[in-house]
Amino acid sequence: MGQDTTILIDDLRQRKPAACQRLLAEYGPAVFRTVQHIVPRREDAEEVYQDVFVKALRGIATFQPQKASLAVWLNRIAYNEAISFMRGRKPVTVYMEDRYQESDLMDVPEDAPFDEQTIGHLEQALALLPPHEQAIISMFYYDDMSLADIAYVTGSIPSTIGSQLSRIRKKLYRIIKPFEQWTR
């Protein structure tokens, strides 16, 4: 942990207003992204986002930098708050035809085309995933978090996160494959 982050944490523990502003400015966008990938309605995401920072500021005294960086610690709070919020909501169930063969479970081919249309299909497929899976994809691909950091955020272990990422990729491929066939 850098000297700058150590000073920020000390200032937060002393409840300095400038430190709170700096925390929001530096870490706010990433935290909001994490929340928004789990909580689809913007108004709800904004509410959860505020709850994350209230909880973080109240719990800054318990932050242990040897366990995780400040960014990862904040993401853990964001993930838990967002998942808790969504548990209180009526679930949205998406039914898909289970018409895929075992051969469809292979990893995405390396020569798979990634044009604008494919990216659009990928975004649609991501929206069909449960919030937990969306969050894992977001943390890994959008936030460039390591498996160890994602495991810390989700309360899991890195090997489990690796397995989940593999299953999610396969699921996304199975969802996208029919789109690709219909549009070609």
Image (cartoon, rainbow, N blue to C red):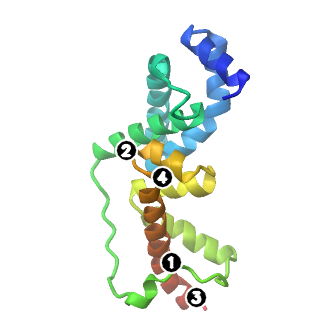
Query: Depth-wise, is mark 3 or mark 4 nearer the camera?
Result: 4
Assess whether mark 2 and mark 4 are in contact (beta carbons under 8 angstroms).
yes
Q: Locate the N terminus by quadrant.
A: top right
Label 4 neighbourhood size at 10 Å, few (<14), some (14-19), many (20+)? many
Q: CA distance from mark 1 to mark 3?
A: 15 Å
Q: CA distance from mark 4 to mark 2?
A: 10 Å
Q: Which residue is mark 3?
A: 183
Q: Which residue is mark 1?
A: 173
Q: Does residue 38 sit above or below 81 in this rendering?
A: below
- Give 138 or 166, whichever is nearer the viewer: 166
Residue 104 appears in which quarter of the rendering?
A: bottom left
Label 1 neighbourhood size at 10 Å, few (<14), some (14-19), many (20+)? some
- Residue at 64% x, 77% y is 117
Between disc 3 and disc 2, whose residue precedes? 2
Disc 3, SS: loop
Q: Which residue is mark 2?
A: 83
Amino acid on which the number 3 mark rests in the picture: Thr
Q: Locate the C terminus by quadrant.
A: bottom right
Between disc 4 and disc 1, whose residue precedes? 4
Q: Is residue 169 visible?
A: yes
Assess whether mark 1 and mark 4 are in contact (beta carbons under 8 angstroms).
no
Q: Which residue is mark 4?
A: 135
Amino acid on which the number 1 mark rests in the picture: Tyr
- Residue at 64% x, 81% y is 110
Between disc 3 and disc 4, whose residue precedes? 4
Q: CA distance from mark 4 to mark 1?
A: 18 Å
Q: Does residue 130 sit above or below 34 in this rendering?
A: below
Label 3 neighbourhood size at 10 Å, few (<14), some (14-19), many (20+)? few
Q: CA distance from mark 3 to mark 2?
A: 35 Å
Amino acid on which the number 4 mark rests in the picture: Ala
Label 2 neighbourhood size at 10 Å, few (<14), some (14-19), many (20+)? some
